[in-house]
């Protein structure tokens, strides 16, 4: 017996036959880096494109150094020369921040490869917390060989610590001094890149004994797909892998419904703030119903109209003898339903006002107590909800007094309300149901070739920016179907001011699904057919070899006007 | 833009880029069938091997014709000659029965290919119900081109109707006469193949006007892996695909635990009667804990000792600073815990005795009412369970007075009891949890190359058996690592008598995990290390192309003493 499955005990664990094989896959590099075997650091030049938001004036006040240095201009990569003197002697730290996403390891590998033997790459464990603690170690070429093309953030670990207090900034400074850092690379989502912008400004100068600063570069990660910047950043890494994993599962379930001929499956998909994931999975699989939170908000749809839409699909299909189907639901949809939003806001107020009286009541008395203190519309809506949802709406608030909406079992809520709507319509149709939530299983899968190539080149780009002396930028790769063009986005050019937890904060605005986007228009043009006919597409498991391994997300292809699903780097 | 994702409306729906590509994959055939491009029907000879169970004497009485015809002997395939006269003019019906499993379409394709233009293959829609209704249609070569290598049972649909009443048998006979059938192929699990045995006997003779009978051949399907017959049938089809799908998801979650560093994930896996699925997924992924129902039953483990084992793993890992892990759980584990079994049996009795009084009570009064009527041990156990489990245990019985144990959220039960056990142990360790159930998403995925090749050859074998005039056999392929040897198992040789629903019935006994099997011994030898160290393996998405596409299940390789994970047909 060979020992393919007899995994030796060891630090990494990436030793399944599959992982042994994917480590051998070659990763292509953008032409500006020269050869894939020995990439050369690129240089950067300011392009004509500047990046501003409505709050840029305010941003300039709080980020004077980095705004001045970048001139808010996007940078474009140009070919560098091998062995240039400035490409030596830097000490660079890299960390993951926030939820994992496929391809993170390849960012580290790209960084290590482009920094080469002349510089030092240090890993921070785990995440921002590790930076505060100064928990750094040197990453070796052997590490790169072990993690290349593998999924997960396990090589460094991750956490969600937000760096914002003076003490925390002091700790970061201490870590920079202790480890004699020249640069930090933050791999994360919108919040983490906001953090990177703040750190870049804070560490701009005066950190080290000679008065010099520490460079900070961000790398755009999130499976939710809500970190975007138009053509400059059509998608963050991890989205392609996550949506391909969810789309396979949803496709399998669609095939199951047509095989077993008796169930409606309600599938909730990860993605609280935006519905990019659900839209992409819908385009890949063609389910009977896919809810898009942004559309619901824009059209001010009520919960009962959403439920009515599902019930109608059930009835329409039943008329043709089809008693099965799939409904896909974005995790955060409840927060986008305007009337739910209004209800939750009033509940938060009422609960805060009457906290003491409320606490003394029996659980059974609480709905009536609260109901009588709500506006009539909200009282009616609350009364229409199943008991377990009412219980959750009246449950404990988080430390900011907010409801943990994520705890509401939206898929079960929609099942129960659809069943009731069918009853009220007098529709005598079978409605046997199952529910699912796909989330965690999509964050740490092995990256698709798209994510593997994209992230390795993001690592090469981030490393090149550091060697080119830049700070306060986010690395990006544009033209993903035409060989790939590395660019750098000034982080301050993405910052807006938003009121969060009662105070103004700089944030990178989450990119929501636009209902006028090509991807959304494609979905809207087809969904009636998908609802009424028993169609489906089953995109299957993502392939690392073979004829269909090189596909980008459908929504990205549509939104960027690509002429094919194929992507091309190098 | 190409139209890869712009699926034309149509019957099949198998038009995603992936499915277009897998249809082009060549499927190898066992050498006895000659060339893959134009396979020749095999003939069969009785081998020296006979198959009997403890109930064979009884079986002979009830199945006189088929037992006599087979002599209880296993058949072996020998090469046939192309264009033989007996290979013409037959009308063969094929149906799916029970839950879907990957590869079903390829059984149909293999059948069609081997029957060739000289015979007629009819599809039955859906399942046994379609046979009763006489809902048959002719399957064309175009159909085969459309479904080859695709997942699902959607081409024919499936259902779970059990054929047992005289009226039903008469309906089957009428269908045979109406469609002038010479043979029926039943693709199903243990119950469906029992059905096939009964049908073979019933249709042995006197069906058609000339007094001849209708042949019946079974094909072994089930993702649960509990339809086995030693070396003759090391595994049913669908198991490899389902376990590879679940193993990818569990592997992804394992990587997520090591990346996020804060959650224990409890994952329930499909498989009510046996733990083959959980064992295989454990071997593929190395989780901290994997429960094997058969071991629990054999060792008469109590619920509290199982919970204690999980709590101990939590504590042991916490001592090393590891606050995360994965626990995998077979769907049916509760039924295997002896004390739960005893409790449920007494509950069934007590509820039946006091049905009227019980029905009048408020929900809140019920546990005390029942508790006072149970034996002390059972009352204590009932009182130890979380409220929602008690509610379920006291909920409505099915039409046979049995509890729907499948409705108990075992994964949540174990989470809650582990949390309580940790508290009682005074263990101050973080224990944040998530739960999952993977089931439906594994039944209809596109088949692995193992399942695709295995099922196509099962179709070739079933068709050859029909052309060779055989009835009452189950097709099988042995020597899956040595080219594949088609054989036929006399169905009566698998039959036992079991008491079900208060009466003796012939059944094919479910093959449970044997605690002394090589796969189980391998698991037991490693699990302490997996529990205490933060190891994992991430087997990744199943590949249809590339270097690791040809792997059989680990447990099958171990149990058959294979010298590699690779399989080889042809």
Image (cartoon, coloured by chain):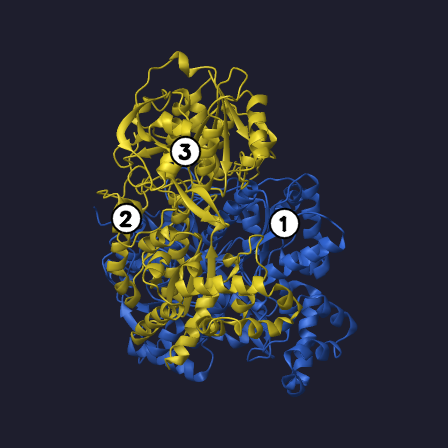
Chain colours: A blue, B yellow
Q: Residues within 10 Å of mark 3 (few under 14, many from 20)?
A: few
Residue B489 tag number? none
Secondary structure under badge 2?
Answer: loop
Q: Is residue B378 above or below residue A359?
A: above
Residue under numbered circle 1: A289
Q: Is residue A98 visible?
A: no
Residue at 45% in and 48% down? B499
The chain identifier of the residue carrying mark 2 reads: A
Locate residue B250 relative to residue A412 in the image: left or right: left
Could you give the CA–CA distance between mark 1 and mark 3, rounded to whole angstroms? 55 Å
Could you give the CA–CA distance between mark 3 and mark 2, rounded to whole angstroms? 74 Å
Give the percent coordinates (x, y) of residue A273. 57, 63
Residue A37 tag number? 2
Secondary structure under badge 1?
Answer: strand
The quarter of the picture where the N terminus of chain B appears is top right
Secondary structure under badge 3?
Answer: helix
Q: Nearest the camera: A302 or A27?
A: A302
The chain identifier of the residue carrying mark 3 reads: B
Residue under numbered circle 3: B61
């Amino acid at each position: 017996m060979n020992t393919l499955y007899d995994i030796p005990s060891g630090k990494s664990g990436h030793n399944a036959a599959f992982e042994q094989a994917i480590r051998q896959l070659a990763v292509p590099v953008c032409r500006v880096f020269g050869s894939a075997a020995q990439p050369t650091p690129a240089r950067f030049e300011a392009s004509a494109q500047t990046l501003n938001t409505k709050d840029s004036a305010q941003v300039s006040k709080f980020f004077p150094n980095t705004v001045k240095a970048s001139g808010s201009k996007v940078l474009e990569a140009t070919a560098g020369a091998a062995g240039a003197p400035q490409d030596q002697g830097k000490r660079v730290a890299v960390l993951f921040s926030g939820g994992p996403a496929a391809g993170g390891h390849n960012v580290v590998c790209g960084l290590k490869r482009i920094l080469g033997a002349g510089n030092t790459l240090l890993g921070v464990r785990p995440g921002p917390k590790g930076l505060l603690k100064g928990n750094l170690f040197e990453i070796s070429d052997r590490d790169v060989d072990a993690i290349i093309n593998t999924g997960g953030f396990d090589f460094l670990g991750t956490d969600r610590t937000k760096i914002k207090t003076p003490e925390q900034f002091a700790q970061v400074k201490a870590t920079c001094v202790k480890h004699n850092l020249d640069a930090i690379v933050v791999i994360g989502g919108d919040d983490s890149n906001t953090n990177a912008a703040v750190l870049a400004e804070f560490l701009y100068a005066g950190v080290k004994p000679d008065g010099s600063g520490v460079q900070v570069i961000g790398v755009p990660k999130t499976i939710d797909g809500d970190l975007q910047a138009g053509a400059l950043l059509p998608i963050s890494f991890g989205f392609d892998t996550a949506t391909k994993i969810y789309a396979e599962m949803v496709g399998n379930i669609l095939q199951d419904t047509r095989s077993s001929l008796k169930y409606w499956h309600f599938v909730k998909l990860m993605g609280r703030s935006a519905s990019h994931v659900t839209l992409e999975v819908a385009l890949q699989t063609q389910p009977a119903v896919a809810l898009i939170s942004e559309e619901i908000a824009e059209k001010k749809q009520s919960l009962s109209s959403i439920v009515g839409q599902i019930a109608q699909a059930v009835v329409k299909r039943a008329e043709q003898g089809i008693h099965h189907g799939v409904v896909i639901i974005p995790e955060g949809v409840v927060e986008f339903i305007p009337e739910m939003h209004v209800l939750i806001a009033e509940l938060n107020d009422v609960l805060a006002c009457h906290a003491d009286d409320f606490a003394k009541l029996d659980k059974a008395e609480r709905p009536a107590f609260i109901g009588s203190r709500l506006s009539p519309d909200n009282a009616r809506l609350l009364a229409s909800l199943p008991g377990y949802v009412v219980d959750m709406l009246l449950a404990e608030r988080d430390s900011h007094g907010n409801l943990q909406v994520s705890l509401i079992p939206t898929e079960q809520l929609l099942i129960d309300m659809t069943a009731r709507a069918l009853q009220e319509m007098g529709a005598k149709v079978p409605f046997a149901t199952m529910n699912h939530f796909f989330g965690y299983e999509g964050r740490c899968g092995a990256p698709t070739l798209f994510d593997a190539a994209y992230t390795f080149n993001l690592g090469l780009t981030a490393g090149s920016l550091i060697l080119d002396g830049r700070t306060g930028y986010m690395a990006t790769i544009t033209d993903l179907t035409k060989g790939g063009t590395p660019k750098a986005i000034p982080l301050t050019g993405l910052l807006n001011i938003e009121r969060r937890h009662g105070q103004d904060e700089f944030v990178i605005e989450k990119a929501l699904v636009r209902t006028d986007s090509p991807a959304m228009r494609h979905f809207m043009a087809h969904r009636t057919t998908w609802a009424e006919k028993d169609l489906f597409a089953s995109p299957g498991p993502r392939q690392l070899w073979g004829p269909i391994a090189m596909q980008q997300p459908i929504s990205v292809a549509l939104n960027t006007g690509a002429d094919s699903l194929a992507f091309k780097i190098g």
